[in-house]
Structure formats: structure tokens, C-alpha cells
Amino acid sequence: MKLCIVDTNCANLASLHFSINRLGFKAVISSDIKELEKADKLFLPGVGTAQNAIYNLKKLNLLSFLKTNTKPLLGICLGMQILGEYSAELNQETLGIIPFKTMKFQEKEGFSLPHMGWNDVKSTHPLFKGLDGAYFYFVHSFCVGLNDFSIATCEYSQSFSAALAKDNFYGVQFHPERSAEAGELLLQNFIKDIG
């Protein structure tokens, strides 16, 4: 099985690459469309702003490829948020693959931003097989509210989508590569059982 991590120039790719390798799979990091087209499954990580991510993807000529991709793809953190239509962070239009908007967390006493740390996630979706109620590591100030495409939920000042899915596109708000055994199991579920 060929696994590719999309090099968006705005993510720490080494830890994701290491996590996949540790599971016994090999992944290639690339922004070359010809290389990415050969993949059986794709990972779209991202850190920073949606504006920066979209700018980089445009510069790398990857926007059309991602929008028309038919292979299972897992967006991680910012990589999940840019699968939507819009991010309130710097008022940025995103890929428009899944109909949702990314908004700032509701301000609430006792909850500091960014939301950083371990939180439990509720899901019965196959991506979370053996993981309902497991704790994952989050770092984000913007979130996606619950919607028709939510497949996992989390609570932090409000209920929000910890994961989303539509057709062959999946996204998780947390960092599986930083989430110890739970994160490794989720990556394994995606590689072995999804698609």
C-alpha cells in the first residue's frame, strides 16, 4: 500500500511520518502531483493559519488535485479545517470539499485559548474503532461546530466536531501523531479499514 503525506509547507511532517513508520507502514512526503496520484491513501496535515495553507497549496498547484481526489484522505488539525468552505481566521475561503465553516471558539469563563491538551472524544464511526471515549491531543483556537458530517464530538467551552467525514474525505481536529497509543490506533484504522 502506498501512503503519501501531502507536503503543505506548513506542518511538522516528521512526527506524522515517524508514527506511520512505527506502525509498520511506509509513507512518502511529497508535493509532487504525479507522486501523490500514485497513493492509495493520503494525509493532509497542517499547522498555522488557513490563509497560509491555502496560499501554499495554490503555489504548489495542489488545489485542483485535492478537490478532485478520489482516494481516502485524512486531514489533520488545520488539514481538517481547510476541507471546509471558510475559516473565520483571517476571513479565508478554503477548499469547499465539505460544507462547513471554521469559527473561533466561544469565549467562556474558565476556558483559555488556544484549546491545548488532552480531551476525550466520543464516536462510534469505524475510524474510531476501539476508541470511543479515548483521549487525543488538541492544539487549536478555531473549531468546527457540530453538523451533518460530524463523526466525532468533543467538549471545550462548547460542543465541536473532533472529526468529520464526507465520501472519501476524513478530518480530525486533534493530532493523532501526538496522541500516543490512541493516535496510533486511529492512524492504523484509517490505513487498514477505511476505503
Image: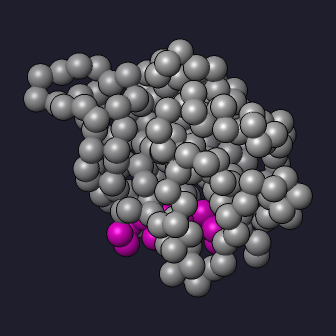
State which quadrant residue 167 falls in. top right
Nearer to us in this view, 52 or 23: 52
- Residue 165 x %, y %: 61, 42
> From the viewer's perspective, is 165 left or right of 111?
right
Q: Residue furthest left?
A: 110
Q: Position of residue 154 (x, y in %)?
A: 34, 41
In the rendered image of this protein, does residue 62 appear above or below residue 72? above
Q: Check residue 142 for magenta coloring.
A: no
Q: Main secondary structure of the magenta part?
A: helix
Give the extent of the magenta segment: 180-193
In percent of the image, x 57 and y 79: which residue is there?
21
Q: Is residue 86 visible?
A: yes
Give the position of the N terminus as an image quadrant: bottom right
Query: Position of 134 compared to 186: left or right?
Result: left
Quadrant containing the C terminus in the rendered view: bottom right
- Where is residue 40 drawn, in percent x and y? 78, 65
